[in-house]
Amino acid sequence: MGKISQVSAKYIVHTQIQIDGVVDRPDVIGAIFGQTEGLLGADLELRELQRNGKIGRIEVKLETKSGKTSGAIIIPSSLDKAETAIMAAALETIQRIGPCNAKVKTDGIEDVRISKRNQVIQRAKELLKDLTEKVLPDSQEITEEVAHSVRMMEITEYGKDRLPAGPMINESEEVILVEGRADVLNLLKHGIKNAIALNGTSVPESIKELSRQKIITVFVDGDRGGDLIIKELLDTSEIDFVAKAPDGKEVEEITKKEINKALRGKVAVEQVKLDLNGKPKEFNREFKNPTEEERPQMQRPMFRSEKPKTFPTKKYNPLFKDMLDDLVGTRGAYLLDQDTNILGKVPTSELSTTIQSLGTGIFAIILDGTIDQNLVRTAERARVKYLVAMDSKVSEDQTSIPIITKNSF
């Protein structure tokens, strides 16, 4: 008798069976052949189809519980779609198996070729991945890998702070000061070997000493963080020029052309200082200058135990309210100078660190958040004159700094 296996079939019919009694596998197979005999005509007679290899071996899986039998019938078919569907529907006409009532339901017809195709695709992906990982790299990849290894070998450590630096730091009269190790690596990649990194927000002693010996060009990212680093360096080190990456970009990611353009456009430190004192765009917002009556009055120094002097609502600088409204939902903070110019905007999560790095010179802090004791202590050490926020956990008698909340306006 010619038979086919599931491997050579095009379709597989999946059927569920429920029997009100206990039967065996031969009973089910007998019912399949017996109750479909003559139903579909001679061309679709199951016995003949199996003999000719049109359908494969019928698999029956049974399980008996509480006097009832249930299970699955699996029939592989090499008939076409329509004939396979007719055969599957014919199985549902079976109503009795042995002496028991039965119910047969076809779950579906599986296209074996689709399953095989999915297996082929999945395996092809695995083989391609394996090939990609093991294949020899092209000349460009080899060049880049060797160049990267050379750059990693070229990077050195400078001073007692062990700052990441290029190999020409000691020999060069001019030094480029960047923010981090990745910046030094990017400059090395493009042939610039006299760069050194701050490696943090505070200025290391090695940089302060180096700035007294070399011509220093500060090269920072094109963001607010870069502005704050410039301001810190102006207060602590003897720098000569300032260069910035394009707006919104970091030194570690810019191209050789962008690096060269930024360094060619460096500005003398004297001009930077004039810009800072003359309210440059990057440090200021376009608010109207307050009148003398609107400008907040300075308080005399007080002891911790003394209740801070409060100001009438009409004396609060209206710019504070505008800036606080502008910050709603940003989780950010503005740092203002004596003339209510914005020194910078930072996330509230980085506020304490930024205040410590800037030291003194902050007149007011406006934040989208709640003032707590830690912020108050940091602000007191930095001699901040005003704290403005949505809310405060600190009462007036716990600090000498006037605290202004949204409800104060």
Image (cartoon, grey):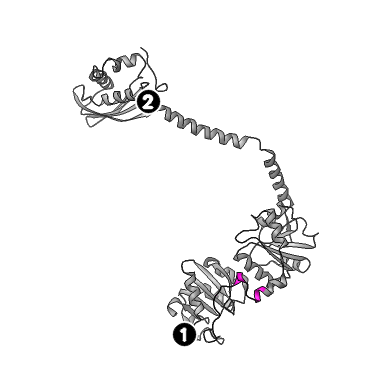
Location of residue 47 in the rendering, given as x and y in whole percent from the top left corner: 30, 15
In which quadrant is the C terminus drawn?
A: bottom left
State whether residue 20 is above or below residue 154: above
The amino acid pointed to by label 1 is Lys
Residue at 70% x, 72% y: name it. 271
From where the camera sits, is residue 368 visible?
Answer: no
Q: CA distance from mark 1 to mark 2?
A: 84 Å
Secondary element under disc 2, as helix, strand or loop, is strand
Location of residue 256 in the rendering, given as x and y in whole percent from the top left corner: 69, 54
The amino acid pointed to by label 2 is Tyr
Residue 216: say if magenta: no
Asked if labels 2 and 1 touch by Cβ distance under 8 angstroms, the answer is no
Residue 286: say if magenta: yes
Which residue is labeled 2 in the image?
11
- What is the number of the mark on residue 314? 1
Q: Is residue 43 left or right of residue 397?
A: left
- Please identify the residue farthest to the top as the structure is shown: 1
Residue at 71% x, 46% y: name it. 147
Q: Residues within 10 Å of mark 1 (few under 14, many from 20)?
A: few
Please tell me which residue lies in front, 115 or 83. Answer: 83
Q: Is residue 71 left or right of residue 137?
A: left
Please tell me which residue lies in front, 255 or 167. Answer: 255
Q: Residue 246 sits in which quadrant?
A: bottom right
Q: So how many labels did they put on this image?
A: 2
Q: Is residue 102 left or right of residue 391?
A: left
Location of residue 286 in the rendering, given as x and y in whole percent from the top left corner: 56, 74
Q: Residues within 10 Å of mark 2 (few under 14, many from 20)?
A: many
Residue at 46% x, 69% y: name it. 328
* Residues shaded magenta: 275-288
